[in-house]
Image (cartoon, coloured by chain):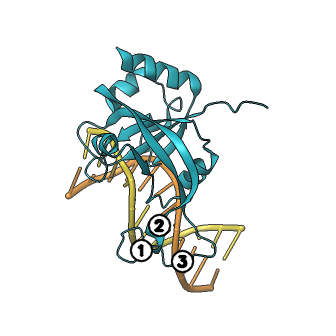
Chain colours: A cyan, B yellow, C orange
Amino acid sequence: MEQKETSYWLMKSEPDAYSIKNLEADGTTIWDGIRNYQARNFMRKMNIGDQVFFYHSNCKPPGIVGLMEVIDKNITDPTQFDQNSKYFDPKSNRDSPRWDCVKVKFISKFKKILSLQELRSLFIEDDLIVVKKGNRLSITPVKEESAKLLIDNLKN
DNA sequence: GCCAACGTTGGC
DNA sequence: GCCAACGTTGGC
């Protein structure tokens, strides 16, 4: 049997909504509330065992704060059917749900945030998508070399 | 299919 | 609050 290669990703969350501390306390979580097709499609490409950098957005300072791992996928996002949720989608239906997501588990919380400013000094544009000016994608792939560089930096 | 108008994200 | 960089919507 051929072993599937581990891929690396980055997922953003606003710490006011859900932070690395929340994930540390919860242990695992489903990454629900994604309402962008490109981001959803990246989640569909993920495999169990993939490593995911946790990025805090819309805060001071924005940056990478921890690491998680994909433990399940193709999970129907329940918030799309919840009329009280801000993620309720009237165009979705239970026969063919529009939004699905992955389940992740907490791996580690970094001692120090790797800020966007520091990320910009480590990566030229396009090498790590999050440093691109005006980038709005909440989920992006990370190249293996970039992931290794990030992990090395976070150990120090 | 085109494209203008509008909405959202998120750094600053 | 500003604005760049998209994504989405809807008229035609």
How crowded pointer 2 is (Cα within 10 Å; few <14, some 14-19, many 20+) is rated as some
B11 left or right, relative to A137? left
Q: Which residue, given by chain and number where applicable, does mark 3 sit on? A: A91
Question: Looking at the picture, which amino acid does disc 2 mark?
Answer: Pro
The secondary element bearing badge 2 is classed as: helix
Front one among A58 and A111: A111
Residue under the point 77% across and 31% down: A2
Residue under the point 49% across and 30% down: A125
**Occupied quadrant, residue A75:** bottom right
Q: Position of residue A5 (x, y in %)?
A: 67, 30
Q: From the viewer's perspective, is residue C9 above or below residue A119?
A: below
Residue at the limit of the structure toward the top, as seen here: A156
Residue under the point 51% across and 20% down: A148
Q: From the viewer's perspective, is residue A9 above or below residue A148?
A: below
- Report the disc number at residue A82: 1
Q: From the viewer's perspective, is residue B9 above or below residue A107?
A: below
Q: Position of residue A94 (x, y in %)?
A: 57, 75
Distance of label 2 from label 3 (alpha carbons): 14 Å
Looking at the rendered image, the disc whose residue lies closer to the viewer, 2 or 3, is 2
Q: CB atoms at circles 1 and 3 under 8 Å apart?
A: no
Q: Position of residue A69 (x, y in %)?
A: 49, 37
Front one among A36 and C9: A36
Question: Looking at the picture, which amino acid does disc 3 mark?
Answer: Lys
Distance of label 2 from label 1 (alpha carbons): 7 Å
The numbered mark, 1 or 3, whose residue comes first in the sequence reads 1
Distance of label 1 from label 3 (alpha carbons): 12 Å
Q: Which residue, given by chain and number where applicable, does mark 2 sit on? A: A78
